[in-house]
């Protein structure tokens, strides 16, 4: 009996001991699972974080490098496209803007150096005052088709460089514009579906009036070098509830947008008039008159042309060596404010018989810049800091040089320095700086009404610094 009790007690202790061991193992397993879960969650978070970072990088950068990424400034994607011109029909020397709901049209023309005819199409993209695509749907600003073909084309005649010349007048009957504002003209290949080029234009509705003058700056030290654009905006019966918040004013000098002045606030509001006679916010460098060259003829040298040659690479035109004008006295030169005229004196048809020329630029300079680059600027580079307009330094000749492939015509240009990390170029470094310079200024007035999602362009006003 006693022995049986001892065995019974031993069995109970053994059973309890086994339960304790099993419980400990279970706790250890749960702890291990918890640790693994934490580790897995950490790894998952790390992976998710990396994906998120990568996706942000892709969202920010990947599209920019895609071939069909739509830039919001004048840009050519296909190097075969040359001599793009966009202006108000009938007024070749105008910038591309038209009045809403009128008979005014824009004229587009360009050359394709590939002699094979393409099926080019175009569409229009509405942008806000900052040239970012607006939130409007296409059927909210276009009536009819949202895309159409460029049907007019002709082949070059009597030229060494063969090309196909295209032209388009728009808005067309099948595609009408219903909203004012900034626009991008986007041309693309219907077969390859690749963007060929994008170009800016504007549609305005004259809802307010502007009275502007270019005067000497308020700051005495700047009066020999800079120009101040003062103006009064008269809203009349047009309602602007909060001009400090709802209006955006942009002033451009000649055709440039890199040095545009933005975000003006009126100094005073009196009744329906807004006064923008400010101190420093509306002041530009006067710069200098544009340089020029004339290649309307390839039979003899015209203005600023040193020599004309023909070799196995085509027509070669060497311009006179330019000189820095930084410290030279101001001299009046009749220019066309950086624009160009496509024209030939050798034949009759300017569009089809004007040939292409390799134009060689040279600017002697003692040493290269180490903190930026020098560019040719004007309508010949579409007012952009382009690779075609980039000057390269020749150490043997101690000069900046560039070669541009241009169609026969009359051209204006300037040398503009772009410092590393900046977006606005400096024309004064090479060209000098004078209050007396004749410049064309344009004042653009945008208004975003309460409850709307786009910027109306309610005025465009042109004023010159001096009358020629």
Image (cartoon, grey):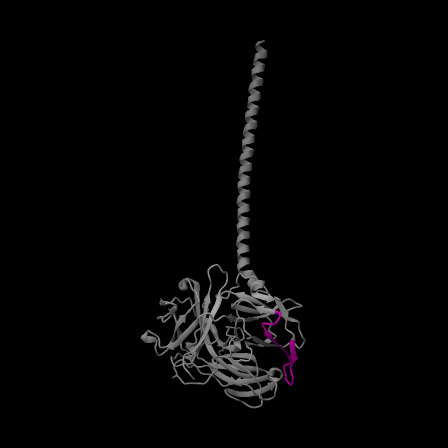
Outermost residue to the front = 237
Visible residue check, residue 60? yes
- Residue 441 in percent (x, y) is at 44, 76
Between 83 and 174, the residue placed more toward the observer is: 174
Direction from residue 56 to residue 210 in the image, left or right: left
Q: Residue at x 40, y 70 (%)?
A: 233
Q: Residue at image x 55%, y 43%?
A: 40
Residue 168 falls within the magenta-colored stretch? yes
> At which x and y percent is residue 266?
38, 67
Looking at the image, how many numbered discs can be counted on the residues? 0
| Quarter the N terminus occupies | top right
**Residue in the picture at 55% in, 79% down:** 404
* Foreground pick, 398 / 354: 354
In the displayed structure image, the side of residue 231 where residue 379 appears, left or right: right
In the image, residue 255 above or below residue 58 = below
Residue segment shown in magenta: 152-174
Residue 321 % position (x, y):
48, 84
Q: Taking the image as drawn, is residue 420 in sight?
A: no
The spot of residue 464 in percent (x, y) is 42, 79
């Amino acid at each position: 009996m006693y022995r049986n009790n001892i065995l019974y007690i031993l069995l109970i202790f053994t059973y309890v001991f086994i339960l304790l061991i099993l419980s400990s193992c279970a706790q250890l397993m749960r702890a291990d699972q918890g640790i693994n879960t934490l580790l897995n969650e950490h790894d998952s978070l790390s992976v998710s974080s990396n994906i998120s970072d990568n996706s942000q990088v892709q969202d920010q950068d990947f599209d920019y490098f895609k071939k069909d990424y739509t830039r919001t400034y004048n840009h050519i994607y296909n190097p075969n496209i040359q001599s793009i011109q966009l202006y108000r029909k009938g007024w070749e020397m105008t910038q591309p803007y038209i009045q809403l709901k009128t008979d005014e049209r824009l004229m587009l023309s360009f050359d394709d150096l590939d002699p094979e005819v393409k099926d080019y199409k175009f569409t229009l993209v509405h942008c806000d005052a900052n040239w970012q695509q607006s939130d409007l749907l296409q059927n909210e600003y276009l009536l009819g088709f949202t895309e159409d073909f460029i049907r007019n084309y002709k082949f070059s005649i009597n030229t060494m460089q063969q090309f196909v010349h295209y032209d388009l007048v728009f808005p067309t009957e099948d595609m009408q514009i219903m909203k004012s504002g900034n626009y991008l003209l986007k041309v693309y290949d219907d077969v390859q579906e690749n963007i060929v080029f994008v170009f800016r234009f504007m549609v305005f509705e004259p809802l307010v009036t502007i009275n502007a003058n270019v005067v000497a700056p308020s700051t005495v030290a700047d009066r020999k070098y800079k120009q101040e654009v003062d103006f009064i905006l008269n809203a009349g019966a047009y309602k602007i509830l909060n001009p400090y918040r709802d209006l955006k004013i942009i002033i451009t000098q000649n055709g440039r947008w890199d040095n545009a002045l933005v975000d003006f606030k009126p100094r005073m509001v009196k009744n329906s008039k807004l006064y923008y006679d400010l101190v420093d916010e509306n002041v530009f460098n006067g710069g200098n008159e544009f340089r020029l060259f004339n290649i309307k003829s390839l039979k003899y040298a015209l203005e600023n042309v040193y020599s004309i040659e023909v070799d196995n690479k085509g027509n070669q035109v060497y311009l006179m060596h330019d000189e820095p004008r930084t410290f030279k006295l101001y001299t009046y030169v009749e220019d066309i404010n950086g624009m160009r005229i496509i024209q030939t004196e050798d034949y009759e048809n300017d569009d089809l018989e004007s040939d292409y020329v390799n134009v060689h630029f040279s600017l002697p300079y003692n040493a290269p810049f180490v903190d930026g680059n020098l560019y040719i600027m004007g309508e010949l580079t579409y007012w952009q800091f382009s690779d075609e307009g980039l000057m390269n330094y020749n150490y043997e000749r101690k000069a900046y040089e560039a070669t541009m492939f241009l169609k026969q015509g009359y051209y204006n240009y300037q040398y503009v320095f772009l410092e590393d990390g900046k977006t606005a170029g400096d024309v004064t470094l090479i060209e000098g700086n004078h209050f007396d310079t004749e410049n064309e200024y344009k004042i653009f007035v945008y208004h975003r009404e309460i409850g709307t999602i786009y910027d109306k362009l309610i005025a465009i006003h042109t004023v010159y610094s001096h009358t020629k």
